[in-house]
């Protein structure tokens, strides 16, 4: 039991609780409906791409996927969510729970990884990989694959 990372376990449990609460209250559906009235359609691949990028770095990629998966429509949703959320998670420390785990583990070893240090690598890597993903997805969308 001493080897269990209790704070991490609680973090994941909290993610599931919050996402379930959002789903049960209907807040996420209301937000998507409101976005639709503003001309934002998550069924559009490019819009979904941007939404995943933003939400992944606002609340982290796992909760972003958990929130968007049941709401987004279309054949492209699964692959887009998987690819974009994974690559977008590298942008900021909070973009991926894996980043938080690494930063915490590094801190326990006396290594400090702050926002600036992470961004020196995370931002360029994210921009390059998202450009590759965007190109690949665009080819798939236009080819009807």
Image: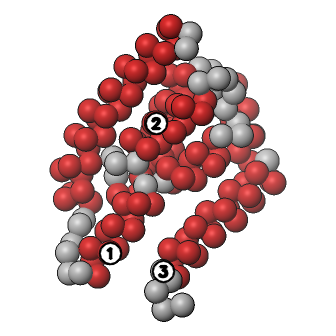
Does any portion of residue 38 appear in the rendered image? no
Earlier residue among tags 3 and 1: 3
- The colour scheme used to paint the residues is secondary structure
Of callouts 1 and 2, which one flags the residue occurring earlier in the amino acid sequence? Answer: 2
Task: Tell me if 73 is positioned left or right of 50 in this view.
Answer: right
How packed is label 2: few (under 14 Cα within 10 Å), some, or many (20 or more)? Answer: some
Front residue of 79 and 94? 79
Q: Are marks 2 and 3 in contact (CB under 8 Å)?
A: no
- Write down the residue under mark 1: 105
Q: Which mark is residue 5?
A: 3
The quadrant holding residue 93 is bottom left
What residue is pinned by disc 2? 83
Q: Reply above or below: 32 against 56.
A: above
Task: Give the percent coordinates (x, y) of residue 63.
Answer: 58, 53
Q: Residue furthest bottom?
A: 2
Q: Left or right: 64 with respect to 114?
A: right
Q: Residue sitting at 19 percent across and 59 percent down? A: 117
Q: Secondary structure at mark 3?
A: loop
Where the N terminus falls, by quadrant? Answer: bottom right
Residue 77 % position (x, y): 60, 30
| Alpha carbon separation for disc pair 3 and 1 | 10 Å
Direction from residue 118 to residue 145 in the image, left or right: right
How dense is the environment of label 1, judged by Cα within 10 Å: few (below 14), some, or many (20 and up)? few
Q: Position of residue 73 (x, y in %)?
A: 69, 27
What secondary structure is marked by label 1? helix
* Disc on the earlier residue, 2 or 3: 3
Query: Closer to the camera, 54 or 77?
Result: 77
Above or below — where is 100 with respect to 133?
below
Residue located 40% across and 21% down the image: 136
In percent of the image, x 48 and y 80: which residue is there?
5
Residue occupying the point 30% across, 40% down = 126
């Amino acid at each position: 039991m001493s080897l269990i990372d209790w704070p991490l376990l609680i973090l994941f449990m909290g993610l599931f609780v919050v996402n379930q609460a959002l789903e049960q209250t209907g807040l996420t559906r209301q937000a998507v409906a409101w976005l639709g009235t503003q001309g934002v359609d998550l069924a559009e691949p490019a819009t979904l791409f941007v939404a995943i990028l933003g939400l992944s770095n606002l609340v982290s990629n796992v909760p972003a996927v958990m929130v968007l998966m049941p709401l987004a429509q279309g054949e492209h949703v699964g692959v887009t969510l998987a690819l974009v959320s994974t690559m977008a998670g590298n942008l900021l420390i909070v973009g991926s729970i894996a980043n938080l785990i690494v930063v915490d583990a590094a801190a326990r070893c006396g290594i400090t990884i702050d926002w600036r240090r992470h961004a020196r690598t995370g931002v360029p890597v994210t921009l390059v990989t998202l450009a590759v993903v965007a190109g690949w997805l665009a080819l798939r969308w236009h080819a009807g694959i």
